[in-house]
Image (cartoon, rainbow, N blue to C red):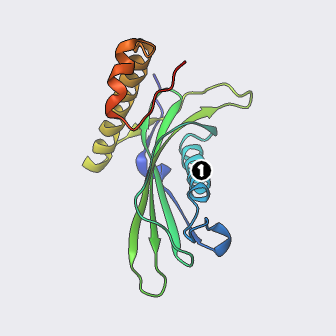
Amino acid sequence: MTTDFKPVSSSKISISELMLPSHTNFSGKIHGGYILQLLDQIAFACASKFCGNYCVTASVDTVNFLKPIEVGELVTMKASVNYVGRSSMVVGIRVESEHIQTGVVKHCNSSYFTMVAKDKEGKSVQVPGLILTNLDEVRRFRKCIKQIETKKEIEQHAKEAKVNSIEDLVNLDKYNVLLEIG
C-alpha cells in the first residue's frame, strides 16, 4: 500500500482551443474524432501530472456527446483524477464550448478515461493515493467504484453468455434484425 497521497486538486488541468473550420465533419460541426484526440491528450496530461510518470490510455469508459460544437467556439476541457487504483487512475473530463460573441457556454461532453502509469521500461508502477477534500470528490470517487464494479459484471456476463443457442435466435425477433443463417 502506498504512503504517498496527493489531493485531487494536484491533478486538475484545463485546456482551451478555438474550433477552426479544419476541425469540422461533413455536417459542418466539430468532428467527434478531433474532440476524442483532445480528450486523450488532456487525460494523459492530467494523469501524468498527478503521478509523475508517463501514462497510457487503458480504456475509454464513457464518452457522451451531449451537444454539437460549432466552428468559432472556444472549447475548454477540464480534467481531474477521480479515482486511483494501484497503477491506474480514472480521469474525468468535462468539455464546454463558449460562443465568443454571446458568452453562452454549453456543456458538450463528459468523458472518463482509465490511464495506467508506466516506468521507463514500460512496466506498470504504483500511483499516489488520492486525498478527497470535499463531498463532490467523494461522490466522483464512489461513482468510479460503481462503474468499475458494473464493468466487471458485464465482462463476467459476456463470458457466461451462450450466444449460439436456438433460444438466443428466437429472442432476436423483437430487434431490427433479419436472420439469414444458412
**Measuring 33% from the left and 44% from the top, which residue is drawn there?**
140
Q: Which quadrant would the N terminus be assigned to in this image?
A: top left
- Could you say whether the residue bearing mark 1 is in a helix, strand or loop? helix
Tell which of 157 and 54 is nearer to you: 157
Relative to 84, is 120 on the left or the right? right
Where residue 153 appears, x then y in whole percent? 36, 22
Q: Residue at x 29, y 42 (%)?
A: 138
- Residue at the image point whose x is 37% and y is 18% from the top: 168
Residue 62 position, x and y percent, is 44, 43
In-image side of 77 versus 8 (left or right) = right
Q: Tell whether 139 sits left or right of 157.
A: left
Q: Give the residue type that dot 1 points to.
A: Ala
The answer to whether residue 17 is above or below residue 3 is: below
Q: Image quarter for residue 126?
A: top right
> Where the C terminus falls, by quadrant?
top right
Q: Residue furthest right?
A: 121
**Image spot of residue 16 (x, y percent):** 55, 68
Residue that mark 1 sits on:
45
Q: Position of residue 78 (x, y in %)?
A: 47, 59
Label 1 Cα crowd, 10 Å radius (few <14 / some 14-19 / many 20+)? some
- Within the image, what quadrant is residue 66 found in? bottom left
What's the residue at 55%, 57% (across, down)?
A: 32
